[in-house]
Image (cartoon, rainbow, N blue to C red):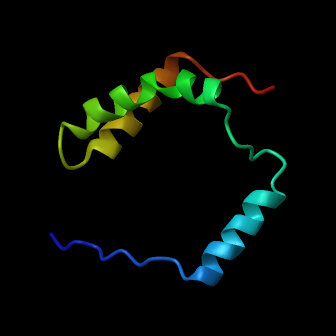
Amino acid sequence: MSKTKLRRNTPEEDAAINRGIAADPDAAALSTQEMKALRPFPDVIAAFRATGEGWQTRMNNALRIYLSGHPLKVA
């Protein structure tokens, strides 16, 4: 299996990405309290990562199974 070589963004690409983020009304920096509320999730990600290569696929499959029984409500 070959490994894909990652390419870093150029400064110009980073600047364009940051402009897009700044222009997005739905993008906002999280407060310290909001960040603390997110902390339980890294343990779930760590548990999937610990299963080795292909963990993202297994996590996606688990989420699909969950969503099949718990459909999201669109606001």
Q: Nearer the viewer, residue 34 or 68?
A: 34
Q: Quadrant of the C terminus?
A: top right
Q: Position of residue 60 (x, y in %)?
A: 41, 38
Q: Is residue 22 above or below residue 25?
A: below
Q: Position of residue 21 (x, y in %)?
A: 73, 58
Q: Is residue 42 above or below residue 66?
A: below
Q: Position of residue 50 (x, y in %)?
A: 20, 37
Q: Quadrant of the N terminus?
A: bottom left
- State the image quarter where residue 17 is shown: bottom right
Image point 27% across, 42% down: which residue?
Answer: 55
Left or right for 30, reference 75: left
Q: Position of residue 51 (x, y in %)?
A: 18, 37
Image point 33% across, 44% down: which residue?
Answer: 57
Left or right for 52, reference 29: left
- State the image quarter where residue 63 is shown: top left
How many dots with numbers?
0
Image point 35% across, 27% down: which residue?
Answer: 44
